[in-house]
Image: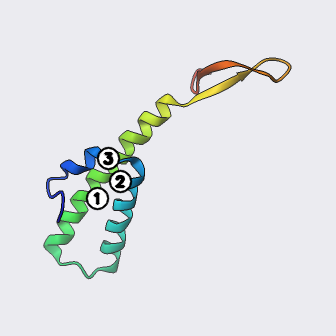
Amino acid sequence: MAGETNEDIKAMSFEQALEALERIVDDLERGDVPLDQSIRIYERGEALKAHCDRLLKAAEDKVEKIRLSRDGKPVGTEPLDAD
């Protein structure tokens, strides 16, 4: 299996990691994978999930909301959780 040490996961985009995770879930749900391989791909799935969580958290930290003036015109941005 490519990336046996899961080092390749660090370079994946959120979309790539999510797609790889979906393939793993499909393989495990089918149940036709040998036990030793199931364990390896489950561990890879855990690493992919953790990577997706990190990327999602980083994206959430960057999200800003647009502040509007009283007449509804944009006047700037502020962190999403600034309330």
Whether 26 is drawn above or below 2: the answer is below
The C terminus lies in quadrant: top right
SS at circle 1: helix
Q: Nearer the viewer, residue 21 or 75?
A: 75
For this orientation, the residue located farthest to the bottom is: 32
Disc 3 secondary structure class: helix
Between 54 and 3, which is closer to the camera in this rendering? 3
Quadrant of res 16:
bottom left
Which residue does the numbered mark 2 point to in the structure image?
Answer: 17
Q: For residue 19, which numbered disc appears in the image?
A: none
Kind of residue at disc 2: Ala
Q: Residue 19: x percent and y percent? A: 39, 60
- Residue carrying label 3: 50
Up-down relation of residue 48 to residue 64 (above or below): below
Q: Nearer the viewer, residue 11 or 31?
A: 11
How many residues crowd mark 3 within 10 Å: few (<14), some (14–19), many (20+)? some
- The location of residue 81, given as percent across then percent down, is 57, 26
| Amino acid type for the residue under numbered disc 1 | Gly
Residue that appears at 39% across and 40% down: 55
